Each structure stands twice: as C-alpha cells, then as structure tokens.
Image: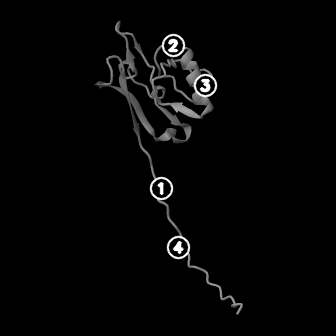
Amino acid sequence: MGDLNAKVGIDNIGYEDIMGRHGLRERNRNGERSANLYAFNKSVIGGKIFPHKSIHKATWISTDHTENQIDHIRINKKYRKTMEDVRTRRGAAIALDQILDKANLKLKLKKNWTNSTTKVQYNLPSRY
C-alpha cells in the first residue's frame, strides 16, 4: 500500500473483518486512520492474517533494533481467499531500515465461453 508509518498493532477489536490478530506492537494514530480507510474501502490487511514469528512480520527496524510492522499489503475482501501467505523478506533490503513485504496469491481464472448464435436474417420488402 505504501509507506504510511501505520502501526496497526495486535488489537483488532472493532476491526475483526479487516485484520487478523497476528500483528506487532500497539496501534498508533496513523494505524487507526489506515484501519478506518481499509474498513471504508472493504479491504483486508494481509500481513495480520497469517501467523509468523515476529522476525517475519517486522517491516521496519530502528537503530536500537526495535521492530515494527508499519508497511502493509492491502487487498479487497472479495479476493481475500486468493491470498495464501504474507511475510517479509529481510534479504531484499530496499533502504537501510525498511524490509520488503511479499504476498503469495493464488488466483483462479474462469474461461469466458461465448455462445455462438446464428445471425437472424429478416426478409423485409423493399420500398421501391
């Protein structure tokens, strides 16, 4: 979703439909705002659904080694079942303190079958 610096936290009371209970730390003001935005847009926070060790949840590490989950992958509730896993990849360092989020999705596509119908021809009398 972007770098919102939103700590959504572990507590999901009132937001059970958009997030799970597998977060890090506490919720801050930006986390409250983003949770309201996700609820309004009928979205789900992907990083809080799946249980992982905290080392695989943290997306930001400070210089004193404080770990926080401030970057989130957002997906529409309609496609929630396609998400298989969300975790961080520590080896793919974007900046010195940011860690990459990775989501595994499995999307089933349907074939669109078109029914070929024959054209209907009308024998209309000519005016002349």
Residue farthest along the left direction in this orientation? 91
* Amino acid residing under circle 3: Asn
Q: Is residue 110 left or right of residue 42?
A: left
Compared to residue 50, the image places residue 127 above or below, namely below
Q: Which residue is mark 1?
A: 110
Are circles 1 and 2 on residues that touch, CB within 8 Å?
no
* Amino acid residing under circle 4: Ser
Q: Which residue is mark 4?
A: 116
| First in residue order: circle 3 vs circle 2 | 2
> Is residue 47 visible in this depiction of the protein?
yes
Pointer 4 local density, CA inside 10 Å: few below 14, some 14–19, many at least 20: few
| First in residue order: circle 2 vs circle 4 | 2
Q: Which residue is mark 2?
A: 26
x, y (%) of residue 120? 61, 81
| First in residue order: circle 1 vs circle 2 | 2
Q: Which residue occupies the foreground of this view, 119 or 106? A: 119
Mark 2 vs mark 4, CA separation in Å: 58 Å
Select label 2 or label 4 by which is in front. 4
| Residue appearing at x 51%, y 38% in the figure | 80
Q: Which residue is mark 3?
A: 36
State the SS at label 1.
Answer: loop
Mark 3 vs mark 2, CA separation in Å: 16 Å
Mark 1 vs mark 4, CA separation in Å: 18 Å
